[in-house]
Structures are given as C-alpha cells and as structure tokens.
Amino acid sequence: MKKLTLISNLFKALSDENRLNIIQMVYKGDLKCALNKKGECKDRTCVKNLREHLKIGLPTVSHHVKELTRAGLIKTKKEGRWSYLQINPKYFRALTDFLKAFINTK
C-alpha cells in the first residue's frame, strides 16, 4: 500500500468523534475492568464498556471498532463473548511521522 493511501485511510478512520473517543479510552485504559467471578473483562478495554460509556448502541460501537481495526489503529482479541481492544502503535507511528514533516518547516 502506498504511504499516502495509508495516511488517507488513517485520517478517514479518525474522522469521527466516537472513534476518537474510543482511541483515547483504549490508549488511556480508562475503561479497563477487573476480572469478575465469571472470568469476564480481564483488566483490558472491553467493547461492552465502550458501549456503556459512549451511550450508543452495540451495533454502532461494533461499526466504529471495525473501522478502527480495518485501518490498523487498534487490535481486537475475542475471548468468549467479549472483544478486547488495544492500540496498534505501528500505525500511529506512520501518522506521527507524516505529521512531523509539517512541524518547523519555515
């Protein structure tokens, strides 16, 4: 994939406020939950918690997570009936490298 195509896809994936919120919450670990007696939510960001925090339906959260995953910005791991999310730093580095070219260009 060409570099500019990759960067364009990253910007498209980040062009939604809910997606930006998801990225921020996953990065900060704001929605991590401890392991309960049933073995759910193992101290990672869970899609269920995103739905509750963003106050949007599960299909909408799933759509946003799918778009972020497709762009490569997050990784998902399904365990049982829950999906857990983590940042994929490789694609954020590509975005950062692209944006650095516009800093201090005088």
Image (cartoon, helix red, strand yellow):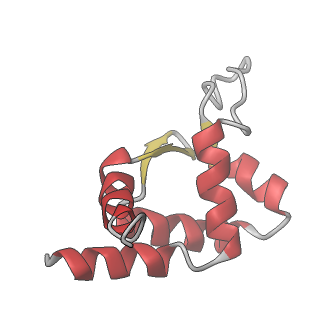
Quadrant holding the C terminus: bottom left
Q: Residue furthest front?
A: 106
Picture quarter containing residue 16? bottom right
Q: What residue is drawn where x is 47% and y is 72%?
A: 67
Q: Which of 70 and 1 is in front in this view?
A: 1
Q: What residue is drawn where x is 24% and y is 80%?
A: 4
| Horizontal side, residue 9 vs residue 16: left or right | left
List x then y, in percent, for residue 17.
70, 73
Query: How many badges with numbers are in the image?
Result: 0
Q: Residue furthest top?
A: 37
Picture quarter containing residue 95? bottom left
| Horizontal side, residue 65 vs residue 5: left or right | right
Q: Which of 56 and 20 is in front in this view?
A: 20
List x then y, in percent, for residue 84.
54, 42
Above or below for 101 versus 43: below
| Horizontal side, residue 40 vs residue 84: left or right | right
Q: What residue is drawn where x is 64% and y is 57%?
A: 22
Above or below for 4 versus 37: below
List x then y, in percent, for residue 64.
58, 71
Quadrant holding the N terminus: bottom left
Q: Nearer the viewer, residue 35 or 90?
A: 90
| Horizontal side, residue 71 vs residue 85: left or right | left
Q: What residue is drawn where x is 62% and y is 67%?
A: 19
